[in-house]
Structures are given as C-alpha cells and as structure tokens.
Amino acid sequence: MVLSFLGDALWIISLSIMASTTRAAWGRIDPETKVPLQFALSGKPTFRVKRNLALLAIPTAAFFLGLALVAFNRNAGATVEQSVILFGVRATAAALIAVGHLRWLKAALDQLQSEGALKP
C-alpha cells in the first residue's frame, strides 16, 4: 500500500514538472506558431503543429498513462513482490516521461528561438 502511494506521489511530481515547464513555454509562444513536435536525427524539425496541441500532447498522454498504471496497480491484487515491480515500473516511467518532455521542450524552444518565433 505504501509503495502505491509513493508511486502516485512520483507521478504527481512528474506531471507537475511537465505542467510548470509547459506553462512557462506557453506564454513565450504565440497561439498560431507551429511548434516542432518531432525532430530528425540531424536535429531538424520534421513535424510541426500549433502551440496548443504541441504543448499539451505529452503531458496529456502522460496523465492517461499514469491513470492506466494506477488502475492496473489497484486492480491487480498484487503480492508484495509484484507491488515492488509495479512501483519500479511506475517510478521509472514517471521519470523517463518527465525527462523526455523536458528534452523535447528545450529542443523545440531552441528551434523557435533560432527562428525568432519566441516572445522575449
């Protein structure tokens, strides 16, 4: 039970990091600006969408993934060993998604900065 609550706390921290960085970027980008959502291996943007969709896509997907993991964790009737494994999966996923979001956001903001598309 304690591991379940710790897993919840890690997801909340992860989502709050994503929300705060998204909020900071939101104010620097005009609503009609096309934000790079995907980058090629060379670092050049390959796919762009409007600000609202781009900035909300990853945190929204992370929220629903977190809900799915919570539902699985609560309904699994897991043993102690399984609870530890589920906690490890939830903790790792929360950290990886937050770091991935931060790396993507930095790359997107750097690209928009080089194009002169960011507000000061």
Image: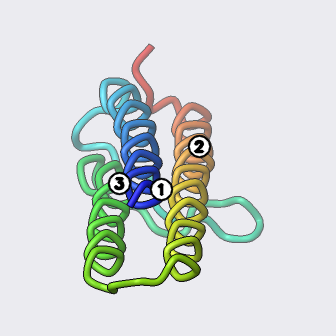
**Label 2, residues with CA under 10 Å away: few <14, some 14-19, many ≥20:** some
**Which element is circle 1 on?**
strand
Badges 3 and 1: C-beta atoms under 8 Å apart? no
Q: Position of residue 59 (x, y in %)?
A: 35, 54
**Which element is circle 2 on?**
helix
Quadrant position of residue 84? bottom right
Q: Earlier in the sequence, mark 3 or mark 1?
A: 1
Q: Position of residue 3 (x, y in %)?
A: 47, 58
Residue 23 shown left or right of residue 98 in the figure = left
**Label 1, residues with CA under 10 Å away: few <14, some 14-19, many ≥20:** many
Q: Which residue is mark 2?
A: 111
Q: Nearer the viewer, residue 74 or 102?
A: 74
- Measure the C-alpha gap from mark 3 to mark 1: 16 Å
- Measure the C-alpha gap from mark 2 to mark 1: 8 Å
Q: Amino acid at mark 2?
A: Gln
Q: Amino acid at mark 1?
A: Pro
Q: Which residue is mark 3?
A: 59
